[in-house]
Image (cartoon, grey):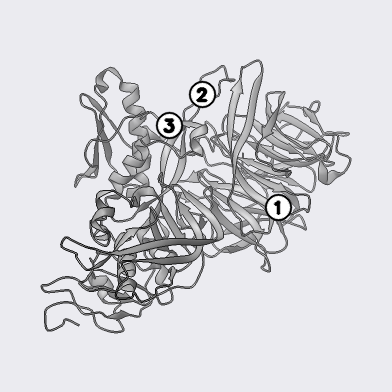
Amino acid sequence: MAGTDGRTTEARLGATASQTDAAGPGAGTAAGPAGARGRIPGLHGPRAARRLGWSATAGLTALLVSGCVAMPGDGPSERVEVLQAAGAENLQVRVFPVGPHPGEDLAGLLTGFLDASNADEPDYATASKYLTASARSQHRWRPEAGVTVLAKSPSRTISAPKPDDLSIDVPVTGVKVGQIDAAHTYRVVANEPYQEKFTFVKEKEGPDKGEWRIDQLPDGLIVDQTNFRNGYRATHRYFYAAADPSVATRQQPVLVPDPIYLRRRTDPLTAAARALADGPSAWLGKAVYSAFDGAKLVGDVSVSDSRVISVKVNVPDFGAQPKLCQQMADQLYFTLLDQQGKGQIERLDLNGVKGGCSQNASQAQAVAPGSLAAGPAQGLPQAYYLSDTGKLMQTQGSGEGTPVLGDLGQPRAGQTPVGSVAVRRDGNMAAAVSSDQRQLFVAGLGANERLGTPVVTSAATSPNQGLTSLSWDGRQDLWLVDRDPAAAKVLMVRGRSVVPVAVGELGGRTVQSLKIASDGVRAALVLADSSGARTLMVGLVVHSGTPAKPEARITGLRPVAPLLSEIASVSWADTDQLLVLGKEPGKLQQLHYVGTDGSQNTDSPLQGGESMISVSASEARSGDQALPVLAVSKDSEIYRLQGSQWREAAPQHHGTSFTYPG
């Protein structure tokens, strides 16, 4: 309640909050993620109480069911203690920082500093008031260095200072579950011990004479999961896929998402645009390029009432470089669209020192992320499955569908039996592996197309050690894995040319399966060690060589689902999201939506059922909606996920290899 001196006294908030946008835009549904980044890190832990400065909106005021909070009339703000209740991870609170009080003890100072450093203040001016004058003048604290995410509020051991103490060290410990670097890139950390030290000294002169202040401290910010969810938002910046020098023809440009986390309420549009201009993450930078290439923003991003976004950069003259202007505008359009949401940008205006250009939704679609997912026709993709009669069937919606044309839809007598199939993204060709997993065929889907001779033959002697994981990128290259124990390898097939693909950072493990993204830049790989334990990794595809002798390698492997002990199937579900059929130790098999940075969808995992052996999703979209997830059971029954229910797709037939093109 308001105190008699006009200041707001401390109050306690005990409430269950309704879900807000803490999960990001378009959080996933049972049928799949509705948006590109409806997720937050897949981190779990106790919800700790926290202290923060805040302002209550009318909507939040309705949640104040325990205690009493009032806005200050005059006088300084004071911290308000908020107890986290069930569902509080989705509570959105705007946090205003509070400076140190005269005579405040070490515990209060450290708590106040941590709160102020995570408040909604762009320049951290209030948090800096907790530092000594020397620490401020010598810039000993660099808040922009990164963010350490702890499972819960950090523990601290503070001894009461003696009268003659001039310096005291305070250890701060916790369990680290995530890390954001200076470039805003998130990395999953598997419960790593965290320990740092804050050194307090008593100021000898100046306005804070006699007060304890922080003199030495770690760079960056320290935040628990609850505050991280409240204060940060998952988003993307976009860069162009690097050209493949081994392709002689012109390549369709496509944008590749680079996942980042930005503070929610400190001018996120300008922050996103500046992050884009800074260039890609160190990881993605090996396989993409940026039209900005050193260009920087001038001023802040603005949005008019008519939803026109205006951005200015320091390019001297766009008039002589119209293509450069359009490329930069494309990158900005999709980067800022992630912040504003679909339909919220009527037009983007980009201006240099001289000249400029504009971009809108229809013009930008040619290079949109995921634009290669459905092939050149850009229609809604069909689904395909191998029926128990040996025919490759195509279906859209309900019903068993119809056989494709050619040998794959009408097998001839004596034809090699097929065990798995992947249809190229344009729907005009398919790759098929024989039922013994030893031979790969590539055939068209026209009326007179024949299976022909094998393109690849594996030397594996056991069916479960041969060819697997057929996967087409959006540039019509086929990828697969040969699990032959004597010569395990990843292969790329271009036409009928077979290119061995080097995979770095394997550490003695072997590739068991692979799924390539439609942009051809990123690949999801399941690795197995000598004990059989499996790990899901995402790597970058780097092309080199010449049209006569193409080369490719996969590098930069990084784990994305460290909590999963078993992985049955992986599919790309969006431009930056994987659908994984797997299980955590001691739990049932489920479907998990996982980002390429390791972050997870906020919704509970979907029950996959112990009987499921493979799943398929698609980066392609029907309008803004994800396509239904497809699945195959151990009994060769095929299913679609409609709403939250699994429904048989073709009750009259058993089938295998139920997938979308790609």
- Return the residue at label 1: 534
Quadrant of residue 489 within the rendered picture: top right
Image depth: mark 1 or mark 2 in front: 1
Task: Answer above or below: position of 153 versus 407.
Answer: below
Image quadrant containing the N terminus:
bottom left
Residue 521 has which mark?
A: none
* Kind of residue sitting beneath label 2: Gln
Q: Earlier in the sequence, mark 3 or mark 1?
A: 3
* Kind of residue sitting beneath label 3: Ala
Foreground pick, 270 / 618: 270
| Residue situated furthest front in the rendering | 164
Residue 366 has which mark?
A: 3
Alpha carbon separation for disc pair 1 and 2? 35 Å
Q: Secondary structure at mark 2?
A: loop
Residue 378 image offset from top left, x and y in percent: 50, 36
Q: Residue at x 56, y 53 (%)?
A: 628
- Return the residue at label 2: 251
Alpha carbon separation for disc pair 2 and 3? 12 Å
Q: Residue at x 15, y 82 (%)?
A: 3
